Image: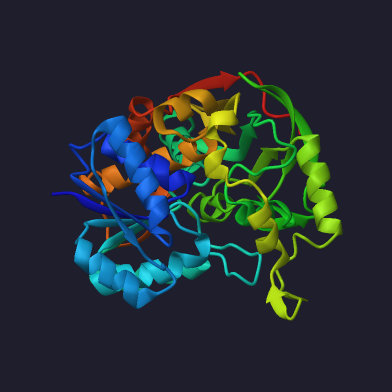
Amino acid sequence: MSKVLVIGAGGVGSVAVHKMAMAPEVFSHITLASRRRSSCDAVAASVKGRTGVTIDTAQIDADDIAATTTLIAAVKPRLVVNLALPYQDLAIMEACLAAGVNYLDTANYEPRDEARFSYGWQWAYQDRFAEAGLMALLGCGFDPGVTSVFTGHVRKHLLDRIDTLDILDCNGGDNGLPFATNFNPEINIREVTAPSRHWEAGAWVEGPALARRQRFDFEAVGPRDMYLMYHEELESLARFYPEIKRIRFWMTFGESYLRHLEVLGNVGLTRIDPVMFEGREIVPLQFLKALLPDPSTLGAATRGKTNIGVIATGEKDGRGRTVYVLNICDHEAAYAETGSQAVSYTTGVPAMIGAALMLTGQWTGAGVFNIEQLDPDPFMAMLNRHGLPWQARELAAPLAF
């Protein structure tokens, strides 16, 4: 029996659970838990209607280690899939250790009171998971996640050595709203407003947020402005691929999004420090999150495609080579299958795939692992079978910027 406990009933959690239900040969029993059981019940109803599979639901405050440990002990899963907020990663890891269960997540830990995400806090659990004979898999979404697997595929099959790596993330979707984020608004805005940072010549190079822009023509989307920014997989890729001289991350943003973000920042609504309002403390960004549309409700209105991939330069058989590995995902097709738009889909499907590989013993180990440390081949094969087909091509020349 391959029981799994999924924590987090947002868009990503919904996609992951739908896709798990479509693979009953791997996931024999699914429990979905979240702070609001009503959210889990809504997902469960959708799963039942689309797949005929019944899943269990539960209410849990994942910040409460003791309560989470009790829930894990009651469900008795072989794996806990953490699709909750990154603030809760360490608490859920602690609960997994206490209950003796393997762990998987899609986003690295970030303190609530500081806009700084890093794998360092979770890497510090290496010895404890190893000694317990348990496996913790970090960053099993799309970016981080699939982009790291793409890098592993490039290094294993396409290049003998990687010199430079550029990750390009384009969401060409349009939901018709003047300002809305495609995943948790609080996490999205903290990430986007952070200083840019990339790896070059053995050191981190920092700069102002969204200050460096390039134009790129994305297949199935068209020309878009993309901006240099820091993203969490840069930290693990720089650690596990020390041969790479330069690693950068680029993400596209429209003018309307950036204009709204600038105004919101100017009036203080993107602040994460508490302010006094009518005799009580509030965090402006959390208040803004309450005003913005819930990303899980945007699926029906979103049109267009995403295009996310990696461009790597290096050497193959003694000659210079540039390769591009990418996935294109359609928002409407994702919604038709799972009831969620493509940004949730491209994160939820990899979480399901990573969970399946752990449960079937294709990915094993004791300790804390990033996804690029594992064999990319079975993951790449499952992407093609489960809705995220990829393509690889050789480019005539490296990026000119």
Q: Residue at x 70, y 51 (%)?
A: 192
Q: Residue 111: where, in percent of width, then height?
A: 58, 70
Q: Is residue 133 visible?
A: no
Q: Position of residue 71 (x, y in %)?
A: 27, 67
| Quadrant position of the C terminus in the picture | top right
Residue with the most extreme left position = 1
Q: Is residue 119 left or right of residue 278?
A: left
Residue 95 appears in which quarter of the rendering? bottom left
Q: Nearer the viewer, residue 336 or 170?
A: 336
* Residue 219, x across and y down, in percent: 62, 19
From the viewer's perspective, is residue 240 above or below residue 98? Answer: above
Answer with the quarter of the image where residue 124 lies. bottom left
Q: Residue at x 63, y 29 (%)?
A: 173
Please tell me which residue lies in front, 349 or 135: 349
Would you place residue 364 above or below residue 166 in this image?
A: below
Instruction: Report the colour scheme.
Output: rainbow
193 relative to 148, above or below:
below
Residue at left offset 47%, top offset 66%: 88
Relative image position of residue 186 (x, y in whole percent): 63, 57
